[in-house]
Image (cartoon, helix red, strand yellow):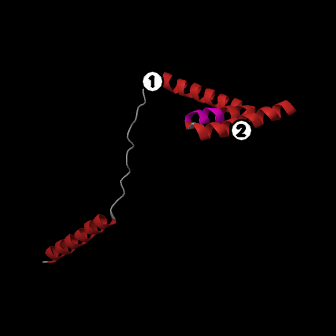
Amino acid sequence: MLDRLEDIEHARFRALAQVLIDKESGVEAFEDYMRIAFPSMHQRKKKRDDSMKDLLKSWTTQGPLQVTPLQEKRGKSRLKQRLVRVEDERLDNLYGKIKRD
């Protein structure tokens, strides 16, 4: 247990020192620290990555992606309906006057 704590502390110190010296190697040192300090997190990340790879592999084996446009359901214009209704009423009134004569 004490050995593990010393390893974690050493990895943390190394990561902090590497970041000050060189940012790119500091990132690698930080990843090493995270792997030493939290081994279960590394395993979970690896399992998640593997499952994503499997999922992507299954998607790519299905062939190319096909996209079909949706049929838009067009709403009825209330203005147009009212215009047609008014026009019909006007024609009915006109034909009503012609029939009376």
The picture places residue 94, in percent across and down from the top left corner, at 17, 74
Q: Left or right of 11: which side holds 5?
A: right
Q: What residue appears at the point 82 percent right and 31 percent down from the top-left corner? A: 4
Which residue in the rendered view is the most extreme toward the top? 61
Which residue in the rendered view is the most extreme toward the right? 1
Which residue in the rendered view is the most extreme toward the front? 21
For the question of whether residue 3 can be seen, the reply is yes
Prevailing secondary structure of the magenta residues: helix
Identity, as a three-letter code, of the amino acid under mark 2: Phe
Q: Left or right of 42: which side holds 65?
A: left
Q: Nearer the viewer, residue 20 or 5?
A: 20
Q: Is residue 29 magenta?
A: yes
Q: Is residue 23 above or below residue 74?
A: above
Q: Left or right of 24: which side holds 3?
A: right
For the question of whether residue 38 can be seen, the reply is no
Q: Nearer the viewer, residue 71 or 22?
A: 22
Which quarter of the figure has residue 90?
bottom left
The residue carrying pointer 1 sits among few (fewer than 14), some (14 to 19) or many (20 or more) residues within 10 Å by Cα, namely few
The picture places residue 47, in percent across and down from the top left corner, at 67, 28
* Label 2: which secondary element: helix
Q: For the magenta stretch, what is the residue range?
A: 24-30
Identity, as a three-letter code, of the amino acid under mark 1: Gly
Quadrant occupied by the C terminus: bottom left
Q: Is residue 31 above or below residue 81?
A: above
**Mark 2 — residue?**
13
Q: Is residue 9 magenta?
A: no
Which quarter of the figure has residue 67?
top left
Which quarter of the figure has residue 13?
top right
The picture places residue 49, in percent across and down from the top left corner, at 61, 30
Q: Is residue 45 above or below residue 85?
A: above
